[in-house]
Image (tube, rainbow, N blue to C red):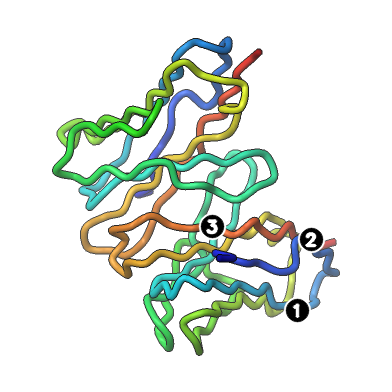
Amino acid sequence: SQQGEEDPQALSIQEGENATMNCSYKTSINNLQWYRQNSGRGLVHLILIRSNEREKHSGRLRVTLDTSKKSSSLLITASRAADTASYFCATVPYNFNKFYFGSGTKLNVKP
Amino acid sequence: NAGVTQTPKFQVLKTGQSMTLQCAQDMNHEYMSWYRQDPGMGLRLIHYSVGAGITDQGEVPNGYNVSRSTTEDFPLRLLSAAPSQTSVYFCASSYSRTGGTEAFFGQGTRLTVV
């Protein structure tokens, strides 16, 4: 499968703590994207990192990409109860115009 | 700006019935796609299109048809519904046909086949 695989499958933390989730993939990529899905809703784009980038920030989000290890991580700092959601990585290969999604990390932030 | 609109939000079908899931976007995006989401399996690509008149298969195309007659609309047809097609279906669109930009998702259609 060319899909990204997130780890862990589920994560439960207290409000104010940091949350880290990881994504591993198998093929060369054009870019990697992270999405959030609240229960019963569609996916919302969080951040896109291109294959020639190593780190990107957006507010409380920090994404890293290591193409040699074919892995990425998403860090949410100072988490809030509103961050409770499932988080998915999507990989976009160079020679295909397709998005490949993993099965997601379910994050629960306890108030 | 409505973004990506899917209809209906919920649907119950009997085995063997056919139906069309509608998807429309108002962002003039070239790339549109359909996914199904099953518990523990993430999103799997059914069909996608890089422009009007151009469609191609994804990972799980069997039992589904698509067409793209306009830039705005990308309907998904279930020809003869089966219980294995019970799932949540998402339509998504993207500006770039090469996947270089973010995807915008609809709110989903929850389909149950009995």
Residue depicted at 46% across the width and 42% down the height: A35
Q: Assess disc 1: are there few (<14), some (14-19) or many (≥20) residues with their C-alpha within 10 Å of its C-alpha.
A: few
Q: Is residue A110 left or right of residue B45?
A: right
The chain that hosts pointer 1 is B
Distance between mark 3 and mark 2 Cα atoms: 16 Å
User: Which chain's residue wears label 2?
Assistant: B
Q: What residue do we see at 18% from left, 33% from top?
A: A54
Q: Which residue is mark 1?
A: B18
Q: Nearer the viewer, mark 3 or mark 2?
A: 3
Q: Are marks 1 and 2 in contact (CB under 8 Å)?
A: no
Helix, strand or loop at label 2? It is: strand
Residue A43's place in the image compared with B75, above or below, is above
Q: Nearer the viewer, residue A109 or A68?
A: A109
Q: Is residue A60 above or below residue A34?
A: above
- Quadrant holding the C terminus of chain A: top right
Write down the chain letter for disc 3: B
How packed mark 2 is, by other alpha carbons closer than 10 Å (few <14, some 14-19, many 20 or more), is few
Q: Amino acid at mark 2?
A: Phe
Mark whose residue sits in front, 1 or 2: 2
Q: Quadrant of residue A107?
A: top right
Q: Which residue is mark 3?
A: B105
Q: Secondary structure beneath disc 3?
A: strand
Which residue is label 2 attached to?
B10
Q: Secondary structure at mark 1?
A: loop
**x and y percentages locating residue B10 in the rendered image:** 79, 61
The mark that comes first in sequence, 3 or 1, is 1
Do the CB atoms of the residues marked 3 and 1 lie less than 8 Å apart? no
